[in-house]
Amino acid sequence: MTDPFDDSFEDRLENIIADVIEVVRHRDSDDSSNESTPEEPRENVEVFDTNLPTTHKYLGKLNNVSGYTIFDEGEIISLLAIHTNTLVFPGFTLPLVMNSQIEQSIMQNFLTKQNVFVLVCADEVGARLYKYGVTMEVFESFSQHGTLYLKAKGRQRCKIVPGKEIQHLGGRLQQITVKILAEPEITSPIATTQLTALKLHRSYLFKDYDSLIRNYKHRKYHLAQFTNPGWVYDRRELCFYVKFIVQRLINFYLKENIPTDPVSLSYWFIQNFQLAHEERLQLMKLDSVIERLRLELKFLEMERLLCCAVCKAEITNQKYVFAMSKDGVQSNYCNPSGHVYETVTVLKADNFNLTGAPSKEFSWFPGYWWTIMQCRLCRGHIGWKFSSNHLHPSAFYGLAKSGLDIKIVDKNQTGNMI
Ligand SMILES: [Zn+2]
């Protein structure tokens, strides 16, 4: 990958800031059409409850695990770690099924003392463990017929401490030492430059974009005393990035599902937008919310197609992505054998065949039948078609991210595969 903050992007960013400030000042941007919203439901059809997938009910009834653990930022601790083929960011849920006896006994023994483990992820080539992870808090667990079912929520980013021994315990489990990463508070670059008496009258520090635009003229007068041009300070204001990213995302997602808190938005974006694995790893490394939002803004500029990972046949476009879960368009689900699938829901797909009989067993979307989807060209597994004759929408597709590649359609150079 190239440097995410190369000069050409810096130049474009300057133009973007100028354009957006101009456009938003002159129009109310709140109304926007959503291209990928399903059609209106027919009569006598029940609309699917998007809260249901987040409960992962297919795992059965689990017991609540009490306790809430948040570590101090910078704290160094030894924790149980598991590596899977997926990344989970703070605020999102990971379902786990453990069939291996050795993994179960290690995990159950660990949970009697501690309800937090670390999820780590393989790097770009999958050859070794990546050095970053997320602490996962187990909030429900249940053991039945030799299988352990768990649900855990991502809490804090952490980094494996270099030089500390990594102890392999069995299966996917290890004992590792991690440092909890701080989420530094980002303040306005001009936070300390205004006299307190004036601040009371008209503050130049803004929590939201609308108040920044309302007072923009006075802010410009204030900024005139500094050596750098005004846009240098504008591009360090978090509210600008939040506004611009949300404004772009509402072309794909329902506005009420998109958080406006900068830190939550930066993680929501990684979990929901169609990013290549390497792009997600790049974001995982960034320590401050403003760096994450800046890189996300760059990724938003690129049009994306979802293609078969094996033969590169085009399966769908980012614009057909829609949310079937309150968690967003992309969630982790677990099959009965314990494999975690990161699944993205879309309304339209091409170049596939259905195989096998429809089934309701272990359905991630209660009430829907699922049928396996294979790539039409190479027969690779790409996901499942979900269908129902009494729920709305009547059909949609859950595509498995493990069977897909992201193809970036660059306006300047087409066909650039990451
Ligand atoms: Zn294929």
Image (cartoon, rainbow, N blue to C red):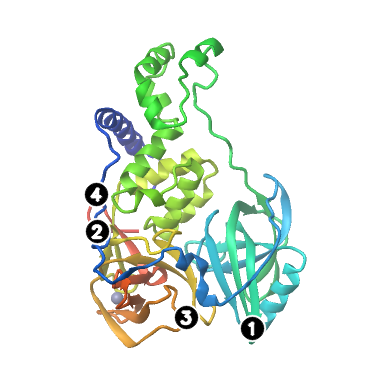
Determine the CA span between mark 3 and mark 4.
35 Å
Foreground of the two, 45 or 373:
45
Q: Which mark is residue 362?
A: 3
Residue pointed to by mark 4: 33
The verdict on label 4 being within 8 Å of ligand 1 is no
Whichever of labels 3 and 1 marks the residue nearer the N terminus, that label is 1
Q: Are marks 1 and 4 in contact (CB under 8 Å)?
A: no
In which image quadrant can residue 65 be found? bottom right
Whichever of labels 2 and 1 marks the residue nearer the N terminus, that label is 1
Q: Residue at x 38, y 55 (%)?
A: 273
The verdict on label 2 being within 8 Å of ligand 1 is no
Determine the CA span between mark 2 and mark 1.
49 Å
Above or below, 330 relative to 410: below
Foreground of the two, 393 or 172:
393
Determine the CA span between mark 3 and mark 1.
15 Å
Coordinates of residue 77 in the picture (x, y in percent): 73, 54
Say what amino acid the circle numbered 3 marks. Answer: Phe
Say what amino acid the circle numbered 1 marks. Answer: Gln
Let me know if residue 1 appears in the view: no
Question: Mark 2, mark 3: which one is toward the viewer?
Answer: 3
Residue pointed to by mark 1: 144
Whichever of labels 1 and 4 marks the residue nearer the N terminus, that label is 4
- Crowd tier of the residue under label 3, counting other residues whose Cα lies within 10 Å: few below 14, some 14–19, many 20 or above: some
Say what amino acid the circle numbered 4 marks. Answer: Ser
- Crowd tier of the residue under label 1, counting other residues whose Cα lies within 10 Å: few below 14, some 14–19, many 20 or above: few
Whichever of labels 2 and 3 marks the residue nearer the N terminus, that label is 3
Coordinates of residue 72 in the picture (x, y in percent): 70, 46
Q: Which mark is residue 415?
A: 2
Q: Is residue 265 left or right of residue 318?
A: right
Determine the CA span between mark 4 and mark 2.
28 Å
Above or below, 405 relative to 235: below
